[in-house]
Image (cartoon, coloured by chain):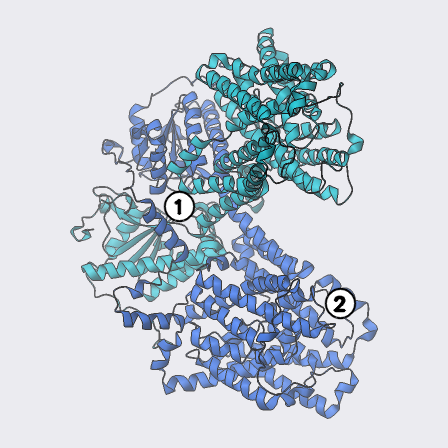
Chain colours: A blue, B cyan
Amino acid sequence: MGSVDYEYPLGMNNVERVHQVEVPPPQPFFKSLKYSLKETFFPDDPLRQFKNKPASKKFMLGLQYFFPIFEWAPRYTFQFFKADLIAGITIASLAIPQGISYAKLANLPPILGLYSSFIPPLIYAMMGSSRDLAVGTVAVGSLLMGSMLSNAVDPNEDPKLYLHLAFTATLFAGVFQAALGLFRLGLIVDFLSHATIVGFMGGAATVVCLQQLKSILGLVHFTHGADIISVMRSVFTQTHEWRWESAVLGFVFIFFLLSTRYFSKKRPRFFWVSAMAPLTSVILGSLLVYFTHAEKHGVEVIGELKKGLNPPSLTNLVFVTPYMTTAVKTGIVVGIISLAEGIAVGRSFAMYKNYNIDGNKEMIAIGTMNVVGSFTSCYLTTGPFSRSAVNYNAGCKTAASNIIMSIAVMLTLLFLTPLFHYTPLVVLSAIIVSAMLGLIDYEAAIHLFKVDKFDFVVCMSAYVGVVFGSVEIGLVIAIAISVLRVLLFIARPRTFVLGNIPNSVIYRNVEHYPNAKHVPGMLILEIDAPIYFANASYLRERITRWIDEEEERIKATGETSLQYVIIDMSAVGNIDTSGISMLEEVKKITERRELQLVLVNPVSEVMKKLNKSKFQNHLGEKWIYLTVEEAVGACNLNLRPSKTNPKKDESEGWNNV
Amino acid sequence: MGSVDYEYPLGMNNVERVHQVEVPPPQPFFKSLKYSLKETFFPDDPLRQFKNKPASKKFMLGLQYFFPIFEWAPRYTFQFFKADLIAGITIASLAIPQGISYAKLANLPPILGLYSSFIPPLIYAMMGSSRDLAVGTVAVGSLLMGSMLSNAVDPNEDPKLYLHLAFTATLFAGVFQAALGLFRLGLIVDFLSHATIVGFMGGAATVVCLQQLKSILGLVHFTHGADIISVMRSVFTQTHEWRWESAVLGFVFIFFLLSTRYFSKKRPRFFWVSAMAPLTSVILGSLLVYFTHAEKHGVEVIGELKKGLNPPSLTNLVFVTPYMTTAVKTGIVVGIISLAEGIAVGRSFAMYKNYNIDGNKEMIAIGTMNVVGSFTSCYLTTGPFSRSAVNYNAGCKTAASNIIMSIAVMLTLLFLTPLFHYTPLVVLSAIIVSAMLGLIDYEAAIHLFKVDKFDFVVCMSAYVGVVFGSVEIGLVIAIAISVLRVLLFIARPRTFVLGNIPNSVIYRNVEHYPNAKHVPGMLILEIDAPIYFANASYLRERITRWIDEEEERIKATGETSLQYVIIDMSAVGNIDTSGISMLEEVKKITERRELQLVLVNPVSEVMKKLNKSKFQNHLGEKWIYLTVEEAVGACNLNLRPSKTNPKKDESEGWNNV
């Protein structure tokens, strides 16, 4: 590193101008507690707009906070209505076949999918703050709910209990979601990272597609397992049962749906082509079956759908053990997953249109809609990506498009259900498959691989866990790895040696800036994370090793012997009592080696604690500097020009006992 | 903040000399993986000493690595032997009564306490790297083991099975400990913070003391619960059963033991007074009972102890369900707790005497000693604090003092066990109480309260959890809170506004340095933690709010309108893909508000990822600076001197949809 031909850095001549590291002005305990609580739970400061307003205005603002409809309805125009009408009808045409399909994924009667697209959108239209979210059931949530509830009750043996359990789980999901919002615990959702969601969604989509092999191949018997191995075994052990009529129909419709999607993607003006395709498929499929009597040749159909609106289901809720435990557990898991999807979708579209989504408010809206849904024969709903994207492309202006969709579904429920009698299940499967293939976001996975290998590992663990294990296993693995990463970051922080960038007063990592030069007689270290119990002993070892290595290097090159260890604390955001003990220990270690420890720029939190714990006094205030430059300057004044190496302390320690 | 009368900071005239933020030199994936693995698992670089050595030397070094006795034995002198002999005899006199007492805490036959002070110290003397650790059973570990095993098997109903289960749990504890050391997972122990240990130990000591009320009050029936409420109920519902003889004896001995401790603490030369006190109490107590026949007046005695050395117990190990599950669980929990105690104790004394303890090596030694112990009728051993402190004070020089202790215990087992027949249990209880009172470290708790409120909360939760719940509950609560703190630090990082310190080129937090001045037209923010999925959306909200607040402030004061948002990334140690998306979003938000985003000093990891993800190109390389000073200088060149505030983007967004 050629630090023999070292020149004093710029600005070294005015070293006497040394700035003090101040102890931050003392703050009363409750003020700093209030500040921490505010930053933790109210980072968006929702009460700011209430400040200095008269009481009546405050009431109105409060009402608008919980029911944004009062904010936008007074300014609603005919212009908006036209746009929302078109969007609402478009999403209804998607909602009806999707609703029926997804209900089957949850092992529930198909009509529930329609019920769930009637009441919840009305609630959301009043309470939701997104203008683009289209409410409805989701594939992954349905699958997850189905698989978790099936463990407790067999949907074929006791369909009624199973149904009631589904309502109960929906209730708990809603209560949990609303509670998260009310208690401002939205940060829990933040712990589902983008990588986790990509892997998890991709895995769930794969599993859902595999499940569709049952109706596409026209199989009567099928595994209850959702993992790829059970499904493949089930499919390939009964090749003689495959029905070509069903398979042909299935692949034709998948091809049709994917081509319309491709077409609409290429020409966004024709978004309605792909939006209408599912309903078109349903109509075509039903007509085909009706005229060819294919239902008698192994093509299963939906059968009778009950006419009429949602029956009340309040009295159906199950509050007895052991079912209630299952319902609570299922509710929490599907609640948080569907919340994550709904909020992510809402945020993405808000970003395009440049308005803000309040995560906690959204949680309350989604939660309330599930609670009310559970009383009116609906199951888990949220804001599915596909439907919201269609809503957005169709040019919706406000949440009123959800009301239009709801009215369209209501009319269907009242008058049109008999038309679905002949709809073949294989068409529904084709609709599911084509929707799911869009969720397998391999491009995002490739991007993760390129940018961040660790995120890629998280993503693939979630995917593999879901596909080979189960939806729950995949989720748990991915979250565990993500949290582990955060913990490892704290447990093993990076430390760097800093060097002087030639002709400047700047000190930077010598590995990052190879032209940065070592300062003779000094070891300048930077620690890159808060010093906590989890890394205190690691840092002590690591700093000792840096000193060892530096002394060995100096011995080899014959430079000025090491006299100062300067630790740049700028990036140490916080310190706890274990961390302070660690610094005390490092001070002892350096003293034994006749080295002087120097701290640079402890931030306010750290400075406060160094002061309270008296470490500041032990070290001596003159050994704490505001910048590396000033520390180096001051040390240079006292540097012994050449010195025999200090006696290395007897590593055996026999003599100084 | 009076930033209207702003002067250009020093060094502003040479802004054209702007340093480049370099993309760090590319590193092959495997090289950086190797580096990360090394830092994670081999931070102490144990293989360094093997470098460039001939094979025979390498073998010798390897042998010395696993058996440090080969390192110190060749240099052992008569001088050392004299010191170790005194220390060994002193700790033996403590080990015998403590061993018997603690075995009773674990519901095991008293003789096991002696067995456990015979074999394990021999193993440790060969493998341990501490010179001061005195091996033996510990109160907290014994209590924990007793309470966990009692849940599976009642020690009174089936004492044989219970005993065998204890050996099995010890085996698993040893295997787990050694495995942690072999796989270099010592970092798990780091997650038990100092605050956790203070609270946990204090709570366990309180619980142990409460348990002693049984023998001190001479009660026959006693609760199985260890929590304070069960014990108090048990004590006060049978006040008529209290035996005054027993109580008087108990309090006299407690007073005696505490006074000797106090005396020895005041005059460290007389350390042996407190070290010998327990054995003296045992002798005095036994003589008293023998001559007064107090065993017939409600003073319970130990009774017969079998003569002879440890019988083998290899064939007693239980490997059948459901007992094995209990044994594994107990082994892991008590293994990690006793490891934490042993390593903490070893490290503290090594610190005083200025030598190094290798945590992973210690784990292998302690693990091996438990594995061998489980084959030879010993139960869980580690390095208890009290005994090691006595060893240290008695002037031990090497682990040979453990060998002396072991020989003394062996002689006791062979010849002296009958002498303990009349030892009253109440004396053992007094010994336990006086040892435990020293573990309730209220001074440390007060220090925690003063320096770090959060650590104090962790400590008190552990204490309250242990005392009111159970040992396991207290431990789980304390660890959960500690981990939560680390996660919260990441989830809610601090952000600061930086200002210029007058007459310098230094920029620091304006709250910490109230004289630091805002730079007109610029908002300089510092982020204090890695940007991860867990905080990405918080940071986006927070940065937006900083911009809002700054614009409001400017509107009120009429300063130069905001034109630049400068983010100092020096303290951002790492970033993941969610973090990069966040930066992209912040860039969009600032663009919409006609602000220019500027980054300062991204560290190498961050720069690498910004480059790979093309964010560097999107932002434009000229908007990334090496120092805040240079960024401010460059922005000042382009600052529009006065400007009407940019149109605030319509927060309703009706028009730009």
Q: In this picture, is A453 found above or below B140? A: below
Query: At numbered mark 2, what does the secondary structure look like: helix, strand or loop?
Result: loop
The chain carrying label 1 is B
| B199 left or right, relative to B540 | right
**Which-is-in-front pick, marks 2 and 1?**
2
Residue at the left extreme? Answer: B5
Amino acid carrying mark 2 in the image? Thr
Other-residue count near label 2 (Cα within 10 Å), few / some / many at <14 / 14–19 / ≥20: some
Residue at the right extreme? Answer: A240
Q: Position of residue A503 (x, y in %)?
A: 31, 38
Observer-nearest residue: A195 or B587? Answer: A195
Q: Position of residue A323 (x, y in %)?
A: 65, 64
Q: Position of residue B613 (x, y in %)?
A: 48, 57
The residue wearing badge 2 is: A223
Which residue is depicted at the point 58% across and 18% down?
B278
Which residue is depicted at the point 74% across and 42% down?
B323
The quadrant holding residue B652 is bottom left
Q: CA distance from mark 2 to mark 1?
A: 53 Å
The residue wearing badge 1 is: B571
The quadrant holding residue A398 is bottom left
Q: Taking the image as drawn, is residue B71 in sight?
A: yes
- Give the position of the C terminus of chain B as an image quadrant: bottom left
Amino acid carrying mark 1 in the image? Ala
Q: In this picture, is A598 found above or below B286? A: below
Query: At numbered mark 1, what does the secondary structure look like: helix, strand or loop?
Result: loop
Other-residue count near label 1 (Cα within 10 Å), few / some / many at <14 / 14–19 / ≥20: many
Q: Position of residue B415 (x, y in %)?
A: 73, 13
Observer-nearest residue: B166 or A217? Answer: B166
Q: Taking the image as drawn, is residue A259 in sight?
A: no
Looking at the picture, do discs 2 and 1 lie on one chain? no
| B642 left or right, relative to A568 | left
Residue at the front extreme? Answer: B240
